[in-house]
Structure formats: structure tokens, C-alpha cells
Amino acid sequence: MTDFALAPLLPELILAVSGLTLLMVGAFSKGDATRSVNVLAIAALLVAALAAATQSPDRTTLMSGMFVADAFSGFAKVAIFLATATALVLSDDYNRREGFARFEYSVLTIFAALGMSMMVSANDLISLYLGLELQSLSLYVLASIRRDSPRATEAGLKYFVLGALSSGMLLYGASLIYGFSGATNFETIAGVMTDHAGGAPIGVVFGIVFVSAALAFKVSAAPFHMWTPDVYEGAPTPVTAFFAAAPKLAAMALLVRVLVEPLGSLVGDWRQIVVFVAILSMLIGSFAAIAQTSIKRLMAYSSIGHVGYALVGLAAGDETGVRGVLVYMAIYVVMNLGAFAVILSMKRDGKMVETIGDLAGLARTRPMLAAGLGIAMFSMAGIPPLAGFFGKLYVFLAAVSAGLYLLAVIGVLASVVGAFYYLRIVKIMYFDEPVPAFDAAEGNGPAAVLAVSSVFTLLFFLLPGPLVAAATTAAASLFGG
């Protein structure tokens, strides 16, 4: 149905008004308003998440069909807003301690979340691009927000240059699809493409390739992952934690919507692209991480591998596969934020340390940190009965049910290789001789995030129903259910 009321836009309106208001508060405040703006930004994100969670799951289009609100967008928005709020919780004490606390950080994060929200509700190639660019421009600045750091400046510049390249690829691919369909609206494109279900024109195939490549860059899938290790390592650690969570989830949701809704009838044409990218991402994520000595670079390659596993579900091209993608990404975000809560606590003699060797003997010097990171690592490796195991189970079962047996086997083998470097971290923490202990924690944010992440990861198997049911409803909404 089509509705011109503003209720479906409530989460976006909350973020837009909050972002502009907090910008004014920070700019005109006589004192340092950084902490106040950060707290208010977290509150705005939680209110937006509540608004998204309580919206009707029925499909509603507005703004001349350019914006859609349905169960799928609602699921993605709740996860994005909660992940963004958690990233702000992790950033507060770190930014202040490292001397680059600025109110603009929280404002940029709010606008990035607004762009992500628009992305997952895009129902038109034009609104898709606008949402993507609003998110991207905010992220470019966040990556280099520590202006006195050459590493952060380099990370921001690399991200900007390669991001501009991906935006150009997206526009070119969109122009090809528009040229052959005569429309930018997803529903109209879907109607045109249904006539070519037996095989798309070569121009449309090229359009799908370019659009898929651009969105693969946004989710840091191989072979478009080249920016990820450098940006993860160079950006301030709270920014890296944010990059690894909300933007990745939003870009994956956008990729799912673009391939399933306007191009759903051409699944035979785009499935081979997704299968190729999934296999390459899983293999590169598994093997390249083995040689890493920096924990942030290791997490970068880990994220590439996890994107590959999520794409296994998308390759299935059906409702079961999309459900698997949503469950996987939700679990991945929780695990990842827990791991970064520990990385943010890696401080010795007043300086941040980032090498894996700095974790040696952590179980004896900081046992709770070691336990939290150990839970995250076991879960990322897919060890049952932790949450990460169920995430992989859902995507692999979707691949098997779609007849993609080889893809599922490669995914399982890549998981075995990936388990090596996750378990190596556990071995270093629990069995190596301890190095000097990390400094005592100066804030409660990382500890709280680590506790919630660990409890969720440990006990997910007792109550998987609510997340799986929400993901099932969300997936069904994309297929007219």
C-alpha cells in the first residue's frame, strides 16, 4: 500500500532533527559539550530504534515510491541503530583519553546512521545513492577525525579515494539498468526484468556486475576488500569498531534488497557473481589473517571472511537464504562489538597497544577480559553451542537447500582454516607467559558492552526464537510474504 503519512519516516525524522539540533548545541555551547552531545546522540539512536521496532510490518511506500518501510527495513534499522549507539558508548572514554574528543564525532555518527537507514529503505536507484553517499561522506570524515595522526589521515584518504571509485561504479551500473528498463523505481524495474527471467540482456548483466561490485566494496567483500586492513588499522579504534558493525550490516541489507527485489527474477544471472565473491572472501579472510600480528588487521580480515559466509546465504536467492543472512549479520555485529570492547582496553603505560603478542598471559593478569575475548573468538570460529555456530548453520543450510553443495563445503573448510587464528589468540591469552598487565579501565562503557556481548553469545542457544522469528518475518516481506 502507499501512504503519504509521515509515520513510516519517524526513525529518519528523529535522527535528522537530532543531528541538526546536536550540531547547533555543540557549535553554540560556551563550554565543552562533547559528553552531553554524545549522551544525547545515544538517546536519539535508542528512541529511533524503538520507533523502528514498533512500526507496522506491512509494506508502505511513500515519497513517490522512492522510500519503503517494511519488516525487512525495520529489522535492519533496529540492528543498525543499536550497533551505532553501542559504538558511541565504546568511543566516549577512549576519545577523551586520547585527546581528540569532539562533539562533531557524535553528530557525524548520527548522520551516518541516517544514511544507513535511508539505504535499507531505498526503493529507487536515486534514493539508494543518496542514502549511500550520506553514510559514506560521514564515514570518510570519521576515519580521519584524528587530524594529528598520520595513520588516521592516510586511512581517511584511502577510504575516500576508493569509496569515490565504488560510487562511480554504482552510478555506471545504475545507469545501465535504467537504460535497459526505462525506470529507476525498484518495483517498475522488477516488472520489466520479469520479462527477461530466462536470461537478461547483456547490458543489464553488465549493470548488475557494476552495482554488485560497488556494493561489495561497501561490505568489504573480496576482491574489493583492499581498503579494509589499512583503514581498520589506521582509523581510531572506536571508529574501526563502528565500521565493523553498523555500516557493514547496512550495506549487506542494501545488497540483499537490490538483488532480491528489482532483480529477483534474474537470480540465475547474479547468483554466480555472489558465489564467486563469497568464495573469494571466505578464502582470503581465512588465509590472509593467519600471518597478521596486529589485532586490528586480523579483525579486518576476519570481517572479510564473515562477509563471505553471509553471502553464502544470499547466493541461495530465496527466503531461507535471506533469513540466514539477517541472523548471521545480527550475531556477527554482537560478537564483533564484544571483541572491540577488549581491543579498546589494550592500554599499557598510558599508550594503546595493538599487537596480538600484547595479549600474552591475559588470562592471568585480566581474567575477565580474557574470558570475554575468548568467548568472542570461539563464537567467530563457529564453535557450538555459541551464537556464531548458529549463524553459520543457517547460511550453510540455506545453501544446501538451494543445491549449492560445493559452496557450502568450501564455507565449512574455510571455517576450519579460520578457526586456527581465532584459537591462536585464545592460546596466547591462556598459555603464553604473561607480559605486563594492561592499565586499569578508566570507564565502564567497554566493560558493559563486553558483558552484554558475552552473555548474548553464550546463551543464544537457549532462546534463539525471537531473533530467528524476526529475521523470518523480515525475509518474508521481501518475497511478498
Image (cartoon, rainbow, N blue to C red):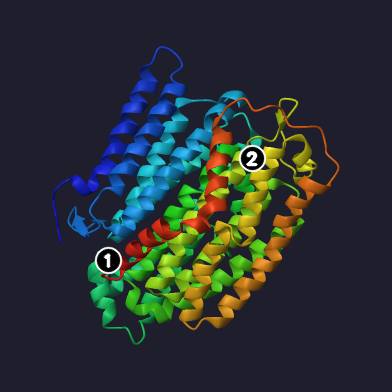
* Residue most extreme to the top: 30
List the residue tagged with mark 1.
186
The answer, for residue 160, to whether it is visible in the render is yes
Q: Position of residue 120 (x, y in %)?
A: 35, 55
347 with respect to 78 (left or right): right
Q: Position of residue 240 (x, y in %)?
A: 57, 43
Number of numbered tags placed on the structure image = 2
The answer, for residue 171, to whether it is visible in the render is no
List the residue tagged with mark 2.
342
Q: Residue at x 22, y 49 (%)?
A: 8
Q: Nearer the viewer, residue 162 or 81?
A: 81
Q: Nearer the viewer, residue 182 or 480?
A: 480
Q: Amino acid at mark 1?
A: Phe
Displayed quadrant of residue 174: bottom left
Q: Nearer the viewer, residue 306 or 217?
A: 306
Callout 2 environment at 10 Å: few (<14), some (14 to 19), or many (20+)? some
Establish if 52 lies above or below 19: below
Q: Identify the secondary structure beneath mark 1.
A: helix
Q: Residue at x 56, y 27 (%)?
A: 93
Q: Earlier in the sequence, mark 1 or mark 2?
A: 1
